[in-house]
Image: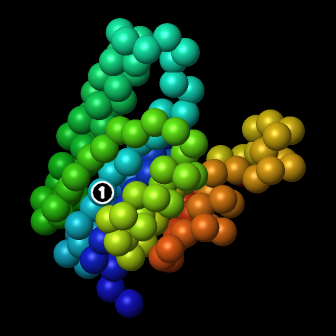
Amino acid sequence: MPFKRILIAVDFSPNSLEAFRVAADMASVHSASLHLLHVIEAWPAAPGEAAVEFVQKANAAIEQLVASSQSALEKVTLTTEVASGRAFDEIVNRARDWRADLIVLGTKGTTSLEQIFLGGTAEHVIKEAPCSALIVRAEGRA
């Protein structure tokens, strides 16, 4: 099944950066469009300059990531987006709205008691995704 619309969600962790590399390669092989999404979950309580700074830092990180992968993205139509909210909700909603064929994201080890009982972002996305989902773990990581 060729994937034509791939949504990649990154949080800039090693696993999500590896997931981006996998998604970029897949998009290139399948001549697919790639939508890069970063979700800011810890939105500042005070709106204004702090919120603008969060978005500016996220956009700068995205630009750096895209620049570092330019050769893999030569034949790929790429769009980027910074959103705020609960990561799994935003990822699933974007996949649905954009009519993605595939969601790619990295996984992290369980980091909190809350995640042990409620599940992490990847688990929620898999349960709610309107399309296929690929979870990537960086090599050599447990």
In x, y percent, where is residue 66? 25, 44
Q: Amino acid at mark 1?
A: His
Q: Position of residue 114 (x, y in %)?
A: 82, 40
93, 9: nearer the viewer: 93
Instruction: Give the residue at the far bottom of this rendering.
Output: 1
Side (left or right) of 36 relative to 102 = left
User: Is residue 41 toward the left or the right of residue 6 in the image?
Assistant: right
Q: Residues within 10 Å of mark 1 (few under 14, many from 20)?
A: many
Give the image location of residue 21, x and y in percent. Answer: 37, 56
Instruction: Report the residue at 66% width, 68% height from top.
Output: 127
Viewer-proximal residue among 25 and 128: 128
Establish if 100 lies above or below 45.
Answer: below
- The one of 14 and 104 positioned closer to us in this rendering: 104
Q: Dividing the picture into quarters, in which one does residue 124 lie? A: bottom right
Query: In the shown orientation, is residue 8 left or right of residue 77?
Result: right
Q: Residue at x 54, y 69 (%)?
A: 129
In the picture, residue 122 is in which quadrant? bottom right
Residue 109 visible in the displayed image: yes
What residue is pinned by disc 1? 35
User: Which element is circle 1 on?
Assistant: strand
Q: Position of residue 134 (x, y in %)?
A: 52, 69
Name which residue lies at 68% across and 60% down: 123
